Structures are given as C-alpha cells and as structure tokens.
Amino acid sequence: MIDWVEGQPVSRLYGDVFFSRDSGIEETRHVFLEGNRLHERFAALGDCELFTVGETGFGTGLNFLCAWRSFVCKAPVRARLHYVSVERHALSHTELSSALALWPALAPEAAALLGQWEALAPGFHRFRFEKGRVHLTLLAGDATVVLAELDAHVDAWFLDGFSPSRNPDMWSPAVFAGIGRSSRAGTTFATYTVAGNVRRGLEAVGFRVEKRRGFGRKREMLVGEFVREPPRPGSCADRARARPASRAAMVIGGGLAGTSVADALASRGFEVTLFERRGSLAAGASGNPQGILYTRLAGHDTSLRALLLVAYQHALRTLAARLPEDSIAWQRCGVLQLAFDDDEAARQASLARAGFPETLFRSATREECSAIADAALPSAGLFFPGGGWVHPPALCRALASHQAIDVRLDTGAIGLARRDGGWVVVGLEGELARAPILVLAGGHELLELDAAKRLPMRMLSGQVTLLRANETSAALRAVLCGRSYCAPARLGEHTVGATHRMKEASEDVRVDDHAANLEALGRLAPALAATFGSLDVRRLGGRAGVRCTTPDTLPMVGALPAVSALRSEECDSPAGLFVSAAHGSRGLVTSLLAAELIAGLIDNEPLPLSASLVAALRPDRFERRGRA
C-alpha cells in the first residue's frame, strides 16, 4: 500500500503523497484545524457537549491525532470529541507505525491508536480513547457506500482524499451528497484543493464556499459553511430528538448486556443506576466460567454476518483495554472452527474466498489445526488468531466499576412506572430510583415487565459441563468449536458445551445434558475426549443458564416504543425507553457494540453501525414488517 520516496509515504494505489512534503503536521494544523476554527470551537464547548469531526480519507491518521491533541488541550474536561473517518484501503499495522513515527510530538496518541489497530473487516469500527472522552468511528469501505449509511450530525469536515485528479471517486457527487446529508446549519469544511468540481459539488449540497491562503506550495485552499438544513428522511429514527437535559439513566440487568450499557453511558457523563435482581453481577446467563468469542459467519452476506464481523473486532479491542490478557479473566489463545461435515466445509470455503484479512481468520489444514491446538483433531477448519475465552463475570465487574455507576444488587422482582416525563423503578418497598432514561438489558426476566411483554423473544436453556484437566488435555492451546466447543483449561477445568433446549427457562443442571456434552466432545475432538476416560456424569460439575433469542436470530437493540404504541403508525420520540436483549449465545461478541449503539441513540451522537444494521436490530422490526 505504501512506497517510501525521500523519506515520505506515497500511496502505491494512487501515486500521491499522504501529506505535504513541506510538513504534514503543519499542513494539518493550517488547513483542517485552523480552516475549521477548531481551537476556538473546542474551547467554547459546554459541559458534556459533543463535537463531531468527519473526514474523507483516514490515511495515516495524522489529522485524527492532531484533532485529538487539540481537543484535549483546548476543550473543557467533560466535553467529548467524536471523529468519523472513511477509509477504503486501511494501512497495515506496520505501515501505520512507520508513517506515524515521523511525528514524535504525537507519540502518545500514536501509541494508543496503534495499540488498537488491526486489519479491519468491511463496515463501521468504533475505537475509544481517553477513557471515552475521544471516540473514533472508522468507516471501512467505499466512501459512496458508507457515507450513505452514516447516521451522524457532523460539525466540521476534513476533506482529505488523495488529489481529485488521482482519486476522482472520493470527490464525486455521491460523496458530496453523503457529506451534505450528515451536515446541518453551521457545519464547516476545509480542504487543501481548489478544484472547480469540488467547489461546485459542495455548493450543490448546501455549502457556502470561499478560498483562503493555502499551505506550503499550494497557494489556495477552500473552506466553507453549510447554510441550509438538508431534507431529512421521513422514517422514524430511534435516536432522541435532542440530547437529554438530565445526565441520569437506569439500566435493568447485571449481565453482559446491562453492564456494557452502564459502562457506555457512564463514560459519557451519565450517572447510572444499575439494577440486578440477584445477589451478584453475571448471576444469570453471563455467569459461565468461560465464554467463547464465537463468530460463526454465514458463507454469504447477511445482516448477521455484517454485525458479527464488526462486533467481534470491537469486542477484541474492548477486552484488550479492560482485562489483563493471559490471565484467569481473558486469554487470547485463538479459536479453531472445525469443518465437521461437508456443509460446514463448504461454508468455510466460501468465507475463505471472500477476501477477509488473514489476521481476522484464515483456513487451516487438519495438520495445521492439530499443531495450533497441540491436540490431534479430525478435520481442517478456520483459525481466528485474535479469539479466545473470557471469564464473563470478570468482564461484567470491570464494566460496572466506573465511579458513576451505582450497582443495586438483590432487588428481586421490580416494576416500572412512567411519571413526570421520566421512568420510575419500583421494588417491593416502593420507589427505588427514577431517571429520564431507562434501558432494559436483562435476560428472560424482562418478559415479566409490561414494557417488554410483546417483544418476540424466545427462551433458550443451555448447559455447560466442567471437566477436570488431565496431563494431556492441559496442553490444549486453542478453543475448539464445531457443533459444540471445548476451551483450554481455566483454573484446572475445561468448559465444554453447550446444550440447547428451546422454549425452556430451567437453570437446573441435568445429567442427560452432561451426557450430551460429552458425546458432542467425542465428535468434535475424539482423541481429546478419550483422554478423560470413562466419566460418571452424576459427579460432573456444570452450569445451566437461560438466554433469549429472536425469530431472525438478531438481537434487539434500540428504542422501545411504549406498550400502548407498539402497533401505532405514529413516529413519536422513544420517550427514553431502550432495550439491549436477545443476544442469544453471541452476547460476548454483540453486547459490547450494542451498548455503543444504545449510548449513541440516547446521546444523539454518530452511530457505530450502518443505518441498514441499525434498522435490522430495531426492537419493533417485526411489528413494522407486519404493518408493511
């Protein structure tokens, strides 16, 4: 992707420099920061106020790092920066590291970015820095496609694609239309180019354009301001019409979904009350000793595949930041998905042909799989080198540890009431708390609440079996997945599972489920299963839990209309009620990114998913299909 010419990075694809040969960092400051008056605008932000920068062409990330540094230096301590950037051809970690080494003054920000950087699957990718004060949403894909899917209000644009003569697609009418859709009255832009088609394209979508003195060898540049409100789509948006005046929220559910939402809101300046009906966090379906970063992808493009790809990479970034690796909480040991029959082999072959980054997953022969796992395995498969296992209770505790989260345990059954334009949580002894924002993020217990009774969630009971490691099994170095799974030992025990019982809500550990798990392990890895010898299933340890799923297997994430309005044709504000539920067996992967979506909807910030995926996850999607 990069060639180096006289110490400067040059794009091999476009034959153009990434930044000015005179001084890239000074060019960024002159063209983009000063051109958009960012220093003064950052300094003028209010408490918890959000400022959004949009960029066409992430490149080496230099513009992002400069904006980040300016924001931290100038903005009030509780203000927040959200940076949205488009990149079709993201640099490798090595290339990015080499390019950013040119700017030692930005070394702290560069190190933080590189610490989360990896080859990205197509889609939207959310990065978090400065403990949530700075967010980056990187749109990996063609600008004309991803900008059309962006749901954001941008305050300032950095138009920094390669030269219009070398990369005309980045300066096309379709790209300008996407920029206009995400702008509002007062949005500014700046760009190094004064090409006539750029000026005319920006004017056509609503910008007033003027020339300014350029940087270095460029005599002139363009700046401008959006001077009209663009027409907005007529569909009902899940987001609030305005950011809530009160920074208070309540979350019901102390598992992965609930603690993820609580953490996302607390990092944005909300005071969060988190309710868990049992005596500890992760007491329900999130309480297994080992959760697997499981991403079984469809062989063809589907909404679920698109969601799992970006959610999986988001989960890996979150785990790297929140839990110590190679510990009893999180081990990035890799995951092998074995091709256990012809249909599975065909699915994996289709994925291998799709051109995803090898750092995401790669095909492995039977011999390679056996070597990776240090165990004799019966088939080839896909290897996910970044995956592994997590102790979900440890993750839940880490997510709920923010000082702005008030954890209320042992609440028992609760009720909800709508009073004075807000929500009230009621326990056996009366009111427990109230706030304008309420997020339902529990498991099957949510179905006891009137606000959630109509949601088409299906209960799914499942059980894992715990096997004491032996001398041979203790050598297992990767998670094995097929129709079942087996994780490397944690504290001397392997987690094997899991059974599935549809439409059941039992948490009883059953002998016949232990037998089923052992049988499944025998098919998954016969040689490994044989090392455990003959086991008395009556003496085995295990854990059962209840998850929820939906008819289309996608989780329910977004605004939840009031019960009385579920079948209404009205497009009213969601009245502060949101849900993150029905993550099924994929909660470890999807709940973290779902929390970012909930927070974005509540706080009116750029959404971390494409508009198509946001619509696919809407809690009222089945009702809307029925009315169509």
Image (tube, rainbow, N blue to C red):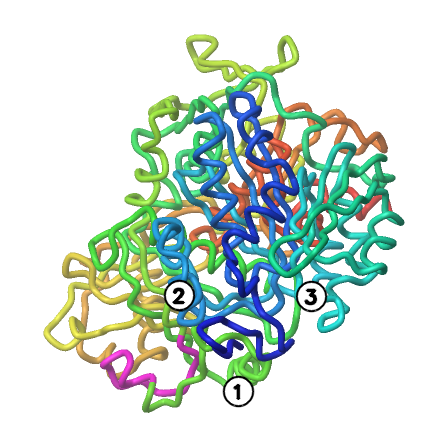
Tell me: 367 left or right of 566: left
Residues at marks 3 and 2, CA–CA distance in whole angstroms: 24 Å
Which kind of residue does numbered mark 1 sit on? Asp
Crowdedness of circle 3 by 10 Å Cα count: few (<14), some, many (20+)?
some
Crowdedness of circle 1 by 10 Å Cα count: few (<14), some, many (20+)?
few
Residues at marks 3 and 1, CA–CA distance in whole angstroms: 34 Å
Going from the N terminus, do you reach mark 2 or mark 1 first? Answer: 2
Q: Nearer the viewer, residue 32 or 237?
A: 32
Which kind of residue does numbered mark 3 sit on? Asp
Q: Residue at x 72, y 58 (%)?
A: 193
Q: Nearer the viewer, residue 165 or 275?
A: 165
Which kind of residue does numbered mark 2 sit on? Ser
Residue range (magenta) = 369-383
Q: Is residue 378 magenta?
A: yes
The answer to whether residue 179 shows anywhere in this view is yes
Q: Which residue is mark 1?
A: 342
Q: Is residue 598 above or below residue 540?
A: above
Q: Which residue is mark 3?
A: 142
Q: Which residue is mark 2?
A: 97
Mark 2 lies on a secondary structure that is helix
Mark 1 lies on a secondary structure that is helix
